[in-house]
Image (cartoon, grey):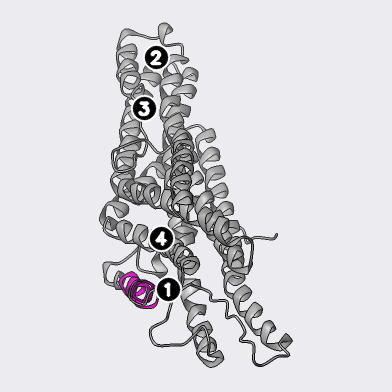
Amino acid sequence: MVLPRLADPFAVMPLLLRLQRFVGLWGERRFRYKFRLAFLSFCVLVVIPKLAFGYPDLETTVRGTAELIFEWNVLFGMLLFSLKLDDYDDLVHRYMDIAKIAFRKDLPSELADYLVHINHRIDKFSKIYCCSHLCLAIFYWVAPSSSTYLAYLRSRNTSIPVEHVLHLEEELYWFHTRVSLADYSIFTAIMLPTIFMLAYFGGLKLLTIFSNVKYCSATLRLVAMRIQLMNRLDEVQAEKELIEIIVMHQKALKCVELLEIIFRWVFLGQFIQCVMIWCSLVLYVAVTGLSTKAANVGVLFILLTVETFGFCYFGSDLTSESLSVARAVYDCYWYERSVSIQRKLRMVLQRAQKPVGISAGKFCFVDIEQFGNMAKTSYSFYIVLKDQF
């Protein structure tokens, strides 16, 4: 796959900010109405039909509920994020301030090289994920339509009705999408922008969290690197550098604090809805078996699992990078330095020994261990649901 090059390797998350600006989640306040309109259209086209018009049987009820949980997880997560845009603006500008420090000419080039490497990694991952998300959205729209229209072409007995495979399991107001081909065609046309909107916000939510957590981890890594590189300096230079390191460490910790404020409730909603949708999707496949409908449900399962695991992985990485500052202090030959430098290093060490990370509503840290706990909880709930149905 050939991806376009990163235009400015010194820019902070340029692709993500461009995608956010398109829907009013970054930039001028007067454009924030764009996301509100998108959320309103989501409620009109998805939430209201699913809640108000019901389902014909248990199979479609399970599938429709699972879809609603997944879609609500995407848009509701972005809605919670949209309520913290002022904090997010502050966070991004703090990233830019730390990036300016790393790219200063009077500091070792290792800092700038590392940040450029991180910028390239974030940009490459973002572009690959956007392409894969686009492909999944196309599949999710094409598969049901092609299955239905091919069934009509192959049908030789007009007395036997053709099953209409819906993109989203819902009764779209007063359209007879399950029996009328004309209504189904209108439904298919309406689902095209709806599915791509859901795919856009689903990808944007994941990229927003992944990129910000990774960049926050990078700021802590820069602090650890500056402490390690301090060994090259004499006493006078080292003490001056250490004062700047303390200030930079405080800036990085403030970034972590803002990250926690912005995303804590997003993560709590993610974990709760993840357990719910895992149970619903596994129950759906267990009840109906493998089919075209099950393939669409499987796409939701894969997307949600990758998304939740990614959150936990990057959460663990953030905690690990915060502890790397303490390790850097311990390994920096502090015992050969003056008493004044030792005191300053002790301040950094005491603060760095307290692990930081992102919590899910202040209840638990978002990390790999928590992902395992969620999987166990989901399986337990599934066993209970299976016995009931």
Q: Nearer the viewer, mark 3 or mark 2?
A: 3
Magenta stretch encompasses residue 74: no
Q: Residues within 10 Å of mark 3 (few under 14, many from 20)?
A: some
Q: Residue 96 at x, y = what percent? A: 39, 48
Which mark sits nearer the N-terminus, 3 or 2?
A: 2
Which mark sits nearer the N-terminus, 2 or 4?
A: 4
Mark 3 = which residue? 355
Q: Nearer the viewer, mark 1 or mark 2?
A: 1
Q: Residue 342 at x, y = what percent? A: 34, 12
Q: Residues within 10 Å of mark 2 (few under 14, many from 20)?
A: some
Q: CA distance from mark 3 to mark 2?
A: 29 Å
Image mark for residue 235: 2
The answer to which of 29 and 65 lies nearer the viewer is 65
Identity, as a three-letter code, of the amino acid under mark 3:
Pro
Query: Mark 1 and mark 3 in contact (Cβ < 8 Å)?
Result: no
Q: Residue 245 at x, y = what percent? A: 36, 28
Identity, as a three-letter code, of the amino acid under mark 1:
Tyr
Which mark sits nearer the N-terminus, 1 or 2?
A: 1
Q: Determine whether, in the image, residue 137 is placed left or right of residue 220.
A: right
Mark 4 = which residue? 69
Mark 1 = which residue? 55
Which mark sits nearer the N-terminus, 1 or 4?
A: 1
Q: Determine whether, in the image, residue 157 is placed left or right of residue 112.
A: right
